[in-house]
Amino acid sequence: MRAAPECYPCFLNQAIKTARRTTSDPRRLKALLDEVSAALRSHPFDVAPPVISEDIYRIIARTTGAADPYRDLKRRCIRQALRIYPEVKKWVAAHPDPLRAAVQAAIAGNVIDFGVAGEFDLAADVSALLDRPLAVDHYADFRKCLARAGRVLYLGDNAGETVFDRILIEALDRPVDYAVRSAPIINDALAEDAESSGLSRAARIVESGCSTPGTVLSHSSPAFRRIFRSADLIISKGQGNFEALAESGRSLFFLLKVKCEVVARLARAPLGSLVLISQKRRKAKPAARP
Amino acid sequence: MRAAPECYPCFLNQAIKTARRTTSDPRRLKALLDEVSAALRSHPFDVAPPVISEDIYRIIARTTGAADPYRDLKRRCIRQALRIYPEVKKWVAAHPDPLRAAVQAAIAGNVIDFGVAGEFDLAADVSALLDRPLAVDHYADFRKCLARAGRVLYLGDNAGETVFDRILIEALDRPVDYAVRSAPIINDALAEDAESSGLSRAARIVESGCSTPGTVLSHSSPAFRRIFRSADLIISKGQGNFEALAESGRSLFFLLKVKCEVVARLARAPLGSLVLISQKRRKAKPAARP
């Protein structure tokens, strides 16, 4: 999807929120906003929001001197998620359809976010979301496609959410490649985060090659693109990956919590809702007759 | 109060929301945002937000060609408010303390807003707010000061809210000057709006001389400043007037719904709460000894 006009102030809000982790000086914050808005002016907004985000967070890192401002928070999120992992695993095992329950747990884990979304209380919010009906629910199709699939590619999103991804991956009963970002961006999961979430016991951890907060294929490595092309089924977690891959014409399943109005419009689901969207490969148009 | 870094993206959000009333073309909206952000870069943010707002809304008016984009909405708000006026009057008259009830009705009317705040349902929202306790409640002081006061100056805010201001003014039982903006800005009340709200039956309508969405004294007319200085009691309605006059050292009463986190911090009240704040004249510091 392309960035919308509404993304413009949202990027500035994210810049303030992130910079406030290291400074509260209004003049330094104003100077940062001036620089970010100059960068936004130079962007034509004909790309997916994660492409612009990468640029914005690079400016924040440079001006605040903090290359990975969410590092401690990411670790804390993973520890918190690991504490409730046994309980959620038990809930999944006791469910009449454990795969469906694991899907729900993975989507609920997307409540974790320090970018677009605001505050959250991990244990309380995940519990509340386990029973929430999905606003778009293509589970039947997901189940059918999974039954036919060999290798699965799972596009990770945030650190901590990784623990809930592990729950779904353990329920898939398939060989899985779990993709993480290659450099710090917001609170997105890196290889070390996937590792400390216990994901290497359930999947092969692979780097996407990009540091955009969403899997932008043109920014990813050739090795990753091969994995992407050869996967039988792709699970895309979170809003950043949705922004990068919705309307891409690729066949995949989006699992996310809808965190802004721009994505809500495209996902055709209300703000705050949980969705499992099946996106089908766009068929090539027949060649025009000569 | 001075503009905060958080006001920066808020101005851009307001620009999009207002411009979308006349266009949905993403390129035109992006061009407007580029121009607004250039204006924000040139502002040092050492002034009250309404001063910057005036500049932003002037850019929106110029680029969209709509000098008063909220004109129809203002009229509709006044009509809606006049429809529920008799019911609220009855509720005030039946209250054990009608003055207190009228204060509450006036603050509840501040739910009307097309600037910072989002959507609202006038009749439902006002009814819900009539019983909501005030998060800051200096009513006892207000009542005492009113008992001693001769002439009252009432600083109006939004069109439609004007009808609820009329309810409080009718309960004051004092000669009242009702101040309106001198040129269209967002949905702020002009003289014609006060007139069609029936305010001329209860007060003398005066223009502040400014078109900032908040009474910025340095932007107001000399005639208005004389009224301001000679008033025995000043009632300031809404967030715009609060932004313009909080920390001004002037003695006045602020009646408003808290619509953003920046104002929430200064008002020491939660976002969304209703407040009646007594601000006392700041005493001049004794001269330092030679």
Image (cartoon, coloured by chain):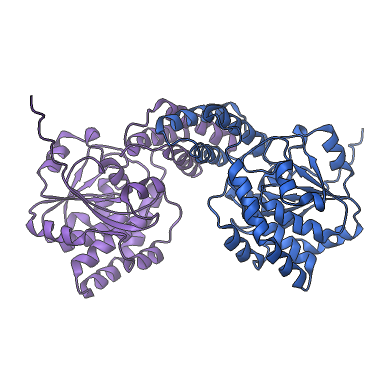
Chain colours: A blue, B purple
Q: Is residue B27 placed above or below A178 in the rendered structure?
A: above
Relative to B142, B80 lies left or right: right
Q: Quadrant of residue A29?
A: top left
Q: Is residue B84 visible?
A: yes
Quarter of the C terminus of chain B within the rendering? top left
Give percent across and percent down for residue A41. 55, 28
Query: Could you tell me residue B58's position as x and y percent?
Result: 39, 33
- Towards the viewer: A203 or B185: A203
- Please count the marks in the image: 0
**Residue A26 location, x and y as percent?**
40, 33
Residue B125, position as x, y percentages in the image: 39, 63
Q: Nearer the viewer, residue A65 or B238?
A: A65
- Image-based side of A20 in relation to B196, left or right: right
Whether residue B49 sits left or right of residue B225 in the image: it is right
Q: Nearer the viewer, residue B204 or A210?
A: A210
Q: Residue at x 19, y 35 (%)?
A: B221
- In the rendered image, the quadrant that contains the N terminus of chain B is top left
- Nearer to the camera, A221 or B152: A221
Is residue A265 shown to the viewer in this render? Answer: no
Question: In screen coordinates, is A4 left or right of B62?
Answer: right
